[in-house]
């Protein structure tokens, strides 16, 4: 079970997630209230590198983009540097293959999507990205938004998909429900953003609690 904490903007948030055992931490370059500048992302990257130099395993740094020019994405990935690029827009498979860093492709499924339609959407990305070690993230679609909405995925559908395709489950997860989500869906990993916020700000105690409860369920 992998755990990703997304939408971070400060080094201390990343370090709390690292100490608690997160596998990935994300900074958002896409249009969002959580959007960071390159300088802010580099501060997070430097903090994680210092953590690593102390001999402690650290989470991988993920940059989140949505329908940005691929040259812009690659330039940011090199400058930060980013270990993963997450694509939250409507990027086609061909676009994903032009990204220089390993890709996490986020796929938003509208409410009412059945298993066949979901697989038809997911499998082309899975087949293209798997040889390069790429990952998938699945969440519920919210019109006009690219993620971080707090809208829960249909866990029944997600569980059916997880038996066929590994992915990160996102959307509506909190410290209070992540254990149930893992038990019902059995995803490859879980992703949280708004679920560890208080008054639209990352809450360090909620970050710790989310990771702790995800790990407890895994055991």
Image (cartoon, rainbow, N blue to C red):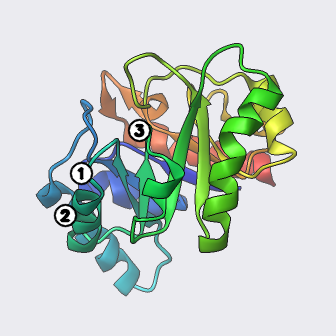
Mark nearest the camera among 1 and 3 is 3
Residue contact at pointers 1 and 2, CB within 8 angstroms: yes
- Give the CA distance from mark 1 to mark 2: 8 Å
Mark nearest the camera among 3 and 2 is 3
| Residue at the image position 20 percent from the left and 65 percent from the top | 42
- Report x, y in % for residue 78: 26, 73
Q: Secondary structure at mark 3?
A: loop
Q: Secondary structure at mark 1?
A: loop
- Give the CA distance from mark 3 to mark 2: 25 Å
Q: Secondary structure at mark 2?
A: helix
Quadrant for the C terminus, please. bottom right
Q: Earlier in the sequence, mark 3 or mark 2?
A: 2
Which residue has dot 3 on it? 89
| Residue at the image position 49 percent from the left and 23 percent from the top | 150
Which residue has dot 2 on it? 43
- Report x, y in % for residue 178: 67, 34
- Of 166 and 206, nearer the camera is 166
Which residue has dot 1 on it? 10
- Report x, y in % for residue 162: 80, 43
């Amino acid at each position: 079970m992998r755990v990703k904490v997304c939408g971070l903007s400060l080094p201390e948030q990343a370090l709390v997630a690292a100490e608690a055992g997160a596998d990935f931490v994300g900074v958002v370059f896409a249009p969002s209230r959580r959007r960071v500048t390159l300088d802010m992302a580099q501060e997070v990257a430097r903090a994680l590198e210092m953590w690593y130099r102390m001999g402690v395993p650290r989470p991988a740094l993920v940059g989140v983009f949505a329908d940005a020019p691929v040259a812009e994405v690659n330039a940011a990935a090199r400058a930060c540097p980013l270990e993963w690029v997450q694509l939250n827009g409507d990027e086609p498979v061909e676009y994903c293959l032009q990204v220089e860093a390993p890709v996490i492709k986020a796929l938003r499924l509208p409410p009412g999507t059945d298993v066949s339609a979901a697989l038809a959407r997911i499998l082309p990305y899975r087949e293209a990205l798997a040889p390069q070690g790429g990952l998938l993230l699945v969440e519920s679609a919210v019109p006009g938004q690219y993620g971080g909405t707090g809208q829960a995925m249909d866990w029944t559908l997600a569980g059916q998909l997880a038996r066929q395709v590994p992915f990160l489950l996102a959307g509506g997860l909190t410290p209070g429900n992540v254990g149930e989500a893992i038990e019902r869906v059995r995803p490859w990993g879980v992703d949280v953003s708004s679920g560890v916020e208080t008054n639209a700000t990352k809450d360090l105690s909620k970050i710790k609690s989310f990771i702790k409860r995800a790990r407890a369920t895994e055991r």
